[in-house]
Image (cartoon, coloured by chain):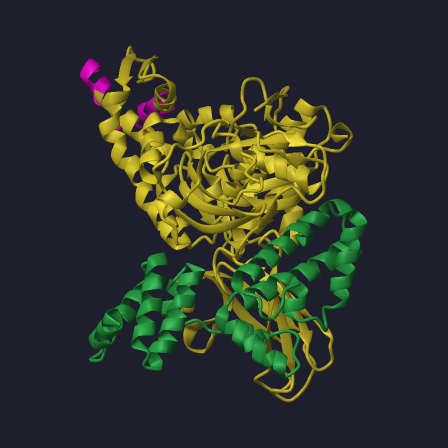
Chain colours: A yellow, B green
Amino acid sequence: MATEQEPVLGIDLGTTNSACAVVRDGRASVVRRGDDRIIPSVVAAMADGRWMVGTRAKKRRSVDPTNVIYSSKRLIGRRFGSPEVVEMRQRVPYKILEGKNEAIMIEAGGKVVSAVEVGAHVLTYLRQMAEEALGRRVRRSVIAVPANFTDSQRSATRIAARLAGLDVIRVINEPTAAALAYGYIEDTDRVIAVYDFGGGTFDVTILQITRNVFEVLATSGEMFLGGDDIDEVILRLMANAFSQQRGVAVQDNPVALERLRAVAEQVKIQLSTQSSASVHVEEVLPGQRSDLDFTLREEDLQPYIEPIIRRTIPVCQDALRCAGLSPHQVDEIVLVGGTTRLPLVRSIVEETFGKKPQTSINPMSVVAVGAAIQGAALMGSLVPMADGGVSAPTTGSSAVLLDVVPRSLGIHTLGGYVDFIIERNSAIPLEQTRMFTTTTDNQRYVRIQVCQGEDEVFENNLKLGELVLSGLRDAPRGEVTVAVTFEINADGLLEVRAMDKETGQQQVASMRVLGGLDDQEIEQLATRMASAGIPSSGGTIVPR
Amino acid sequence: MATPDDLRAHVLSLQEGLERMTYYEFLGVRPSSDYVAIRDAYYDRAQRLHPDRFVSFGAGSLQRSAYTVYKRISEAFSVLSDPQLRVAYDEARLRGAHRLDDVARARRRSPQERQISNNFARIYYRAAVGKLERGLLRAAWIDTQLGLSLEDAPGLRELESRILEDPEGPVALQEETIA
């Protein structure tokens, strides 16, 4: 029975918000704490040295912006010098620093923490929330990541989960999880477009399901396009309204803007279900009589946000083109992310694909639900059904996820070019072996630079790190040949092993991942995490 | 419906064949089977033997065996589903090989090919390049158009204009159209 087996926590660790779910008594349920099912992925450093996570941490953005870390998912597993991180450093009020090995560190509350640690705080919060709701220890998890996450991002997320006391039985792609939540595993072959419009990012993924096998055909996205852009528009409208009502400009007042920003999001949420939203904001300028009464009608907002939402159309077209499909060949459209609740988003999706999107599952928790269903399916206890429920085990009829490598993997060769070893879109797991020969007498080690990307020139790709083969035997040059096997495992993670061709001896192959952490650093983090308390309160679980 | 014992037996028999069975045997198809038959066989194997099916067995030797076996299934499909690699493999098989070696499998893609993300569009591109080299303008044109119907890639556009600019190009295309 399901109740006797330890539940597997399905986790959606989002850029803006996170959620988790479990399958219990044959049903997938979203974990809830109080009224909250969605936890802001925000971590605040408090003056007393503790960390605060979630809604309360998010509220601190307006009073203590430099010590509140948000959007840390944009940083996890990246190198300090990468363009995304450069962009982030300009956008966020907290301080991003360079750590050892090009790792990303964040300064908050007088402490310097790694991006992995920030993710671990959010995950710990989710785990504790689930444990309180279920009344038992939760260890196992299935964690969802964007389909285009690189090897370093996937492994960094795994480490964050480990630090949070979670054993990750599978890393799953977010769009795949969303499709699983809808139970698209019946006998019919289908093409599904997953339209994920979150707080800060937009992604569209085309999935093909053939006889219960899931394949990611294409994925495309915009790094900086999301609900935050819509909040920004509403914020501007509110600031203008305030200037008109009070005769004081607040467009350049950061404190007032932060106060209004929190309300702007509320206005957007109201407009997802109503045609008009009204709010009263007290003391926009702290300590002054400066209340704001603000009303916004959907039709007045539309001209401002339509251009933002229309930016998702070319991204959808790009994904379709990569998948070699036209819009009418898409059978279902699944919506993910809070922004997809806006009626205008739904109508633009309908216009783009020529059919109505699926809306029966809450787009804010659909990924967590799918991850939980996959967790239960992996443990062989339950089989998901089309209605989102789960049935008794019948081996062989649950979905198999057949993922592909999102980016090619290559190594540095003479002249600064790339020798591609694993091609993009190859089905995983897979392995490829390459031979490396010594070039000097008694050479003791070989260094190999590894990258991910599609460019012929090494430097134009994402550099993953350096592979070092050490402890080679003494021999004249050219006489030691090492066979190096690059393997992408079922989680999409790179593993490397090496063997001396002549002696059949296993060689030491260590991969130093740029922006990554070594085992010793992870140990230190684990100790630090154990001592940092995260406040908690009672939680419950509810059906999704 | 397969029982856990059937599953175990299936994995072990394939593992035993790792050093001797051909890709065709691994997927349970014939050397004459077409792409659709090979794809279906692969999906069928994936359904039954994917590593995810063995998570509940716990970490152990069966899980490792299943993983090794599945990697070979995946390799077999990647070779047999690619016309060029399949030809190379069939030649290697005549010389007694059961597996295509790593170097042959990791065939270098040209920069133009690399820009094409759709697998079938890339296959058409490669075929068109080969046919163009042999002066088969009409055949190259058809492959280019088939490729373009899947993906509007710069490499395919370039081929299209090369065919049109070829002094023989328009003639070859016209003749075929009349015929």
Up/down of A378 relative to A404, above or below? above
The residue under the point 30% across, 41% down is A311
Quarter of the image with the C terminus of chain A in it: top right
Please, which residue is most extreme toward the right here?
Answer: B5
**Residue B71 left/right relative to A297:** right
Q: Quadrant of residue A247?
A: top left
Up/down of B62 relative to A377, above or below? below
The chief SS type of the magenta part is helix
Q: Where does the magenta region start and end?
A: A241-263
Residue A402 screen position, x and y as percent: 57, 51
Q: Quadrant of residue A335?
A: top left
Residue A373 screen position, x and y as percent: 62, 35
The answer to whether one can see residue A80 in this image is yes
Q: Closest to the observer: B7 or A164?
A: B7
Up/down of A342 relative to B46, above or below? above
The residue under the point 34% across, 37% down is A354
Residue A6 screen position, x and y as percent: 74, 33
Q: Check if residue A255 falls in the magenta segment.
A: yes
Residue B1 screen position, x and y as percent: 73, 45
**Residue B72 left/right relative to A52:** right
